[in-house]
Image (cartoon, rainbow, N blue to C red):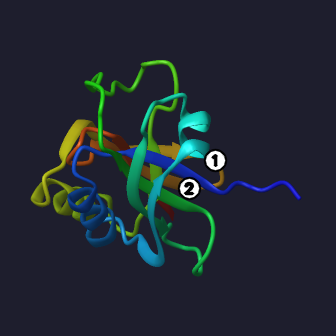
Amino acid sequence: MFRYVHTNIVARDKNKLIDFYKKVLHCCSIGEVRDLQGQWLDKMTGLNHAHITGEHLVLPGYENSLPTIEIFSYDELKNRIDSEINRPGIAHIAFEVDDVLETLREILDNGGSKLGEVVTADYPNNVEATFVYAKDPEGNILELQSWRNR
């Protein structure tokens, strides 16, 4: 077997970020709450006395298992380097939404921010797409996209 399982976000305030992803981005709890520690975790992370707490949320558009966003917090956190759209590594998490402007408004109303402008682009076969980059309350970059036939 070979399949995609999850993406992990390390949060300063896991409860606030979990609530944001549930409320604004329609992720759902599947009851996979974690409180992890022990020698195996220290070996896996390379940290001494690692302690992780958090929850797996199923992504919108999927039933009740995989893939998930795993929002965790460590007892000890390093300082954050601000996310930038052109920084090497994972750049953003994309969500297809019914209404980009409405979802952006919900992000802004719930502690997130906008990055760049809302744009509309023409695609082949008479398809039009609307896009915007935004940030969740902890600065992780999100892409919102909506597609329609013209």
State the residue in front, 114 or 125. Answer: 114
- Image check: 2 left or right of 59? right
Residue 111 position within the rendered picture, expressed as x and y whole percent measured from the top left: 13, 52
- Residue appearing at x 42%, y 20% in the figure: 86
- Image check: 40 left or right of 32? right
Q: Quadrant of the rendered structure where residue 48 is?
A: top left
Query: Marks 1 and 2: CB-CB under 8 Å?
Result: yes
Quadrant location, the N terminus: bottom right
Q: Is residue 59 above or below residue 9?
A: below
Number of other residues with Cα within 10 Å of mark 1, as a class: few under 14, some 14 to 19, many 20 or more: few
Q: Is residue 139 above or below residue 136?
A: above
Q: Secondary structure at mark 1?
A: loop
State how far apart marks 1 and 2 are (Cα): 6 Å
**Residue to which mark 1 is pinned:** 124
**Residue to which mark 2 is pinned:** 127
Residue 3 position within the rendered picture, expressed as x and y whole percent measured from the top left: 77, 56
State the residue in front, 35 or 90. Answer: 35
Q: Amino acid at mark 2?
A: Val
Q: Which numbered disc covers residue 103? A: none
Residue 22 position within the rendered picture, expressed as x and y whole percent measured from the top left: 32, 70
- Residue appearing at x 24%, y 44% in the figure: 12
Question: Could one spot residue 44 in this view of the protein?
Answer: yes
- Image check: 101 left or right of 94? left
State the residue in front, 47 or 27. Answer: 47
Residue 91 position within the rendered picture, expressed as x and y whole percent measured from the top left: 46, 32
Q: Quadrant of the rendered structure where residue 50 is?
A: top left
